[in-house]
Image (cartoon, grey):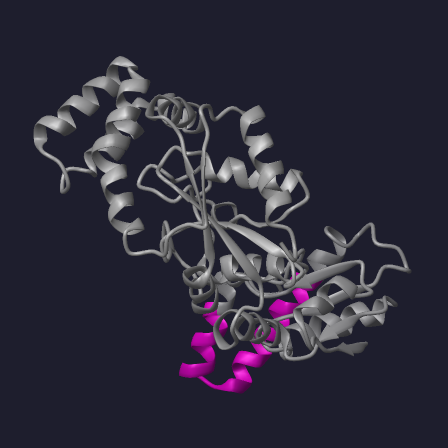
Amino acid sequence: MTPCTLTALSDLATLDVDTIIDVRAPMEFAEDHLPGAINLPVLSDAQRAEVGTIYKQVSPFDARKIGGALVAQNTGRHLQTALADKGGSWQPLVYCWRGGQRSGAFSTILDQVGWRVQLLRGGYRSYRRLVVAALYDTPMPHRLMLIEGGTGTAKTRLLHHLAKAGAQVLDLEGLAQHRGSLFGAVDGGQPHQKMFESRLAQALTPLDPAQVTWVEAESSKIGNITLPPALWAAMRAAQRVEIAAPLAARADFLCRAYDDLTTDPALLDDRIDRLRPYHSAETIAAWQTQARAGDWAMLAEGLIGQHYDPRYAKAASRNPAPIERLTLDTLDDTSLAEAAAALNTRFTSGA
């Protein structure tokens, strides 16, 4: 059994292991874990709670004895199932919360089988400290360039085309699993805050700070996710490119981008209903009537013109003026690809 120490997030890309195994309970794993890790818990959520209760209310000795038996049983099950097909050359990296008893017990058994096991020194906490240092404790070194524009100007889609053109991009809405508005929730829900931060740190690590990194302009929250301070400060200080397009083109793009809502009338009706604090009952009723009738273009134009554009104009007035304004007549993939190629050429390193 060999100890493994992470000194930087970039170390994760050079680990000489076949599988990263998180032996914590499923709830711990769901909150956050090392990138690419699989979960082989040595205690279930209920068992972990039971052992913790015994530790506090009975004695640490009894808790360790009962916990040890459970760990052995669960490890045996993993050997007979998830690990049954692993050959003698397989090399895992194992970790728990702080590199203590759970991962130690599991690793000892795997080591006795004959596998070359690496044990993460400090466990998940050692990894989490690196994420916090990158996103909370130090300024971001990256040269961010923000894409801003009103709702329906295809900013996220443009970001994807920039990536295809070879530019560095950071897709925050993709990492947060949310499209950034009241209508922006997607199937599967959002990750935990810590999981988002892990994804963010993983996305930032390979980026070259000397090159421009394109990011969609966002508020400090995307759905229920809060942007970490270092990122938010860098975004506030970043230069901006503004995208504009005719209202009809924007409405058409929204109808295509949010087709999941147009196929779920009840969900769309509920989302519109949440706008009641901001608009009259008559306006809400008109929008819901359009939704029920399938008049998507008129509904999109109304939401853009009456709800989103006034809020965007107010927010934009507080920001520095964009260094470039780009007006697109249409928002199809051909136009967006051409715009992305031009932006990538215009704002390359040293430009």
Q: Residue lying at the far right in this picture: please name it.
A: 89
Residue drawn at 56 percent across, 71 percent down: 134
In the rendered image of this protein, does residue 182 appear above or below residue 60? above
Q: Is residue 54 left or right of residue 130?
A: left
Residue drawn at 62 percent across, 37 percent down: 341
Quarter that holds the C terminus = bottom right
User: Is residue 7 on the magenta stretch?
Assistant: no
In the rendered image, residue 215, in percent from the top left (x then y), is placed at 51, 50
In the rendered image, residue 94, in percent from the top left (x then y), is placed at 71, 68
Q: Name the magenta segment's main secondary structure.
A: helix
In the rendered image of this protein, does residue 307 appear above or below residue 98? above
Extent of the magenta region: 49-75
Residue 39 visible in image: no
Quarter that holds the N terminus = bottom right
In the rendered image, residue 255, in percent from the top left (x then y), is placed at 39, 23
User: Is residue 70 on the magenta stretch?
Assistant: yes
